[in-house]
Amino acid sequence: MPSIAKPTAIHPSLHRNELGLTIRDYEGSMSTLCAGCGHDSITAAIIRACWEISLAPHMLAKMSGIGCSSKTPTYFVSGAHGFNSAHGRMAAIATGASAANRELTYIGVSGDGDSLSIGLGHMCHAIRRNLKMLYIIENNGVYGLTKGQFSASADVGSKSKKGEPNRMAPIDSVALALSLGATFVARSFSGDKEQLVPILKAALSHRGFALVDVVSPCVTFNDHAGSTKSYLYTRNNMLKATETDFVPPASEILATIGRNGAVSVAMHDGSVVRFKGVPPDYDPTDREKVLDYLSEHHGKGEVVTGLLYIDESVPDMHELNNTPAQALAKISFEKLCPGSAALDALQEDFR
Amino acid sequence: MLRAGVEKAVRVNDFAIKLANVNGTGSASANGLLMQAIFRMGIPVSGKNLFPSNIQGLPTWYEIRVNKDGYTARALDYDLMVAMNSQTYERDIREVRQGGYVLYDSTWPLDPHLHREDVTFLGVPLAAMCNANFRESRERILMKNIAYAGALIAVLDVDMGVVEQLLDEKFARKKALRESNHKALHLGFDYARQHFDPLPFRLEKMDANRDKILIDGNTATALGCLYAGATVAAWYPITPSTSVMDAFTDFCKKYRKDPETGAMNCCIIQAEDELAAIGMVIGAGWNGARAFTSTSGPGISLMNELLGLAYYAEIPAVVMDIQRVGPSTGMPTRTQQGDLLECAYASHGDTKHICLYPANPAECFEFAVKSFDLAERFQTPVFLLSDLDIGMNDWVVPRLKWDDSYRPDRGRVLDAAQLEQIQKFFRYSPEDENFVAARTLPGVSSKGAYFTRGSGHSRTGAYTEMPDEYQEVVDRLLRKHRAAAKFVPAPVIERRSRAQFGVVTLGGCDAAVREALDVLQSRGIAADFMRIRAFPFPESVEQFLNDHEFNFIVEQNRDAQMKSLLLLETGVAKDKLRSICVYGGFPLSARRVTDRITSQLGELTERAVHS
């Protein structure tokens, strides 16, 4: 496939972040997805979030599996290494990559087929390990690259392009993650960058596994009347449960009072997630209440969005394994190999 | 007892015994105690544990072969059977050689139909003695084993001082257990001394084990991973490989705790399945850590998908395959060399992998280290194909040696300074003399950033669906695999004067095949020996095959997988290779090899006469 070159000229008026980089420095190559694809909007949100938090491009690792969503890491932060692996296996590969080098920031981009069918087990276990990464599911309810089969996230009654309704119950990634003990769970909509960018920034500061499910309509196979993953359906039925601001570390934290008594959550890295508004009785740190809220509104056909649940108290995989602060891949060989004297001594046990 | 012929010559340090037990009754420690005591007496010895895939209640056997000349492959002729399992009495008693002995628990009378005129029965009232001397029911069961060990010590002349010393070491902190063991040992010992004459075979101290250790292959493999500097290990529990990771975990606790920070310089992850285990290894290898998984055939089947990714995207990964009997679940606690083809060509599409075939725990240690060097130098998966016999049995091998000047071969990895000096980095070009292109690690420099993919890519690393660009890369991969032949362990070749043919084998068949060749030599049949130690095959492998009019390929699988691999990967003519496959699941014995070679030679002669 011929690659499509992007113009490299940068307008002098573009703002620079703390690293002196403009937002253009966080772009990747030109998208080859369909025009209007929700995934491209998510890519734009990732670019903005990474630029705003001044993430050094080479300290990012972009992980993905297979599918339309998994192609997108090519479209952002070209200065970062990317790994477009195998269908469903991204979480496993990211786990090993993180084990070897915890100093990097990991963004995994997956889809509903990749995460909720072929790779469901790996995602569940990455959640259990509280692997420190931002894990995005670009959720469109359909297999795009193989032309329109239902995915496991398709709602009961949602119709395919040919008009056939899905009759099997969906796997809801948000409810599943909460039931597995996930420590950061959010849902957003590709058409709502205002909401998505702060969520992504908060997710990148989270202590462990941050699941961000983004409803991302497939313009080619699942954007018709009768689909519950279309632009129209999502706009009409979206319920913003929470609104959040992300305050990076060392910034001045202004006391704000939200609509219904806001909550601020201090992140492990010193930043703060500030909930500007939450519904009465909604507590984004109370797993049971969040599940009840989701279940109540899901029953009404509503798509509940926002940073829905957060818990910064749970140690991540590295803390659980007591690994050093430095990347294991960088530990000197001299520290790793016990040497001949130790081997001689040890072998007395084998006599 | 029936008096054994007093005139009969006594065989010293040359016999085999078999112990038939019920699993889960604690017999393993008694059997291991005997084996270790004989080892400490300086006598060449081997122990083969033939255990079931079960925790309690099924038949289990342990075989000990003692041989002053160092022939310690599995023997099929048992001089003494310790029959402790009434479920298998019939079969066990049948297996004793003519003139041999059966030691049994005479608390209950032996069914008369089990009696054999040509063997001597040594009855020891083990249960009665233990019931009289121990109160707890579990202790009575456990101590019965130690009591029969005591009786064996008496009739075989095991050095009691050595045994007492071993018990002192084992129970240094468990005084009560030490007491019980001592008591049970002497119950059996005293009874045997009082009731039995010396047997016509016995032990005598030697000095053959001064520079030897007693170790199983899985422990040695784990030790190799520790010494190679592996930091990430991911695995899913599976027999018979589990003890690799158990041992690695124990070694890490001992040697990898950072004295300054208290942190563990390793990350061992029990994965959700083998798909994930190999995925984690690949992720870690991509990030520059030495990473490995340990598994067995069923795990390799699951790993096939991502092994192809690692091969095609050129990511180092090390897989310890402790082979068991397949296909499917097969026989998890029986041994086989059944994964040779599966590993050599793992995954869909055109793939070829580097495989190493250790013959014993010493080579497991050496080759484990080598696996990481090869994986990083050639940026590809490397398999170490051990098996249940090597991995889980204790072997007497030369002391392991470590060269402190060893430094890992990290292969071609560009650092930030090297990246600064080049115009533009491309992942898959330029290549070196071994057809390897330099890689970069994440977190070093944006100049080295690239997109790793299992999809079609060109020499620059860019996505492609163009035939010429695709082919250029996969053709280089083939050349790279061939180049590895110069770096893998060379075959072990031993030539004899006036050899009539070649005998080729691999892995744990080594001892049995060597013994078989010595037996054949004593019958006037001389053959050259070659043990293949790696794939891709070094040139000397093909040379050896062509040097002989014909060659027997001895291996432990039904389908002659090594022979197939030789036919596929060398230019040797098909009629030069003849197969000897022994694949029932127990370790190979020399007699199987001599019998099969003799009969095939007979057929060849007959054919020559008729033509």
Image (spheres, coloured by chain):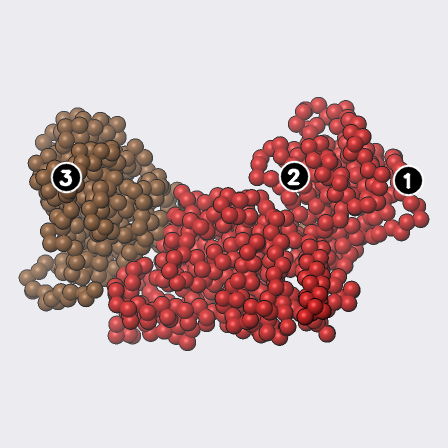
Chain colours: A brown, B red
Looking at the image, which is closer to me, B262 or B185? B185
- Residue at the limit of the structure toward the front, as seen here: B610
**Looking at the figure, which quarter contains the N terminus of chain A?**
bottom left
Above or below, comparing residue A136 to residue A264 in the picture:
below
**Helix, strand or loop status at disc 1:** loop
Q: Position of residue B168 (x, y in %)?
A: 71, 41
Q: Are discs 3 and 2 both within one chain?
A: no
**Helix, strand or loop status at disc 3:** loop
Q: Amino acid at mark 3?
A: Gly
**Mark 2 to mark 1: distance in Å?**
30 Å
Above or below, comparing residue A167 to residue A108 in the picture:
above
Residue at which label 2 appears: B60
Q: Classify residue B433 as left or right of residue B183.
A: left
**Helix, strand or loop status at disc 2:** strand
Label of residue B3 in the image: 1
Q: Amino acid at mark 1?
A: Arg
Q: Amino acid at mark 2?
A: Thr
For the residue carrying disc 3, how many other residues have a C-alpha within 10 Å: few (<14), some (14-19), or many (20+)?
Answer: few
Task: Determine the chain carrying the residue at label 2.
Answer: B
Residue at which label 3 appears: A163
Q: Is residue B377 visible?
A: yes
At 46% from the left edge and 70% from the top edge, which residue is drawn? B482
